[in-house]
């Protein structure tokens, strides 16, 4: 979750980690948010690779 609204999400949304690389990609996806700021991206988004590491 990026942007100002991310810090105000209710506890229903779980915090699962931190972006350590590729933040520019997350921000590009964020830019596809609908004008209301809530809902699916306004264009398809495909994640080809995601790496989750336990710390």
Image (cartoon, rainbow, N blue to C red):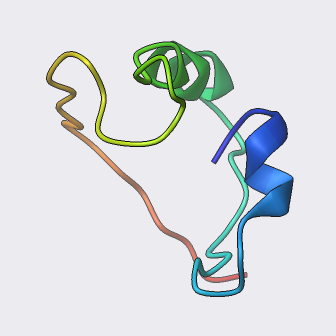
Looking at the picture, how far across and down is residue 15, in whole percent? Answer: 68, 75
Q: Is residue 9 left or right of residue 22?
A: right
Question: In this view, which residue lies farthest toward the front?
Answer: 36
Residue 45 vertical placement versus 42 (above, below): below
Q: Residue at x 54, y 31 (%)?
A: 37
Q: Is residue 50 left or right of residue 35?
A: left
Q: Residue at x 71, y 77 (%)?
A: 10
In this rendered view, identify the residue nearer to me: 54 or 19: 19
Residue 53 vertical placement versus 6 (above, below): below
Residue 48 vertical placement versus 7 (above, below): above
Q: Within the image, what quadrant is residue 43 found in?
A: top left
- Quarter of the image where the C terminus is located: bottom right
Numbered label tally: 0
In this rendered view, identify the residue nearer to me: 27 or 20: 27
Q: Within the image, what quadrant is residue 34 found in?
A: top left
In this rendered view, identify the residue nearer to me: 2 or 55: 2
Looking at the picture, how far across and down is residue 5, in whole percent? Answer: 76, 44
Q: Residue at x 69, y 38 (%)?
A: 2
Looking at the picture, how far across and down is residue 33, in whole percent? Answer: 44, 24
Q: Is residue 34 left or right of residue 13?
A: left
In this rendered view, identify the residue nearer to me: 50 or 13: 13
């Amino acid at each position: 979750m990026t942007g100002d609204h991310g810090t105000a999400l209710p506890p229903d949304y779980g915090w699962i980690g931190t972006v350590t690389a590729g933040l520019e990609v997350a921000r590009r996806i964020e830019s596809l948010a609908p004008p209301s700021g809530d809902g699916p991206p306004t264009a398809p988004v495909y994640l080809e690779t995601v790496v989750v590491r336990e710390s």
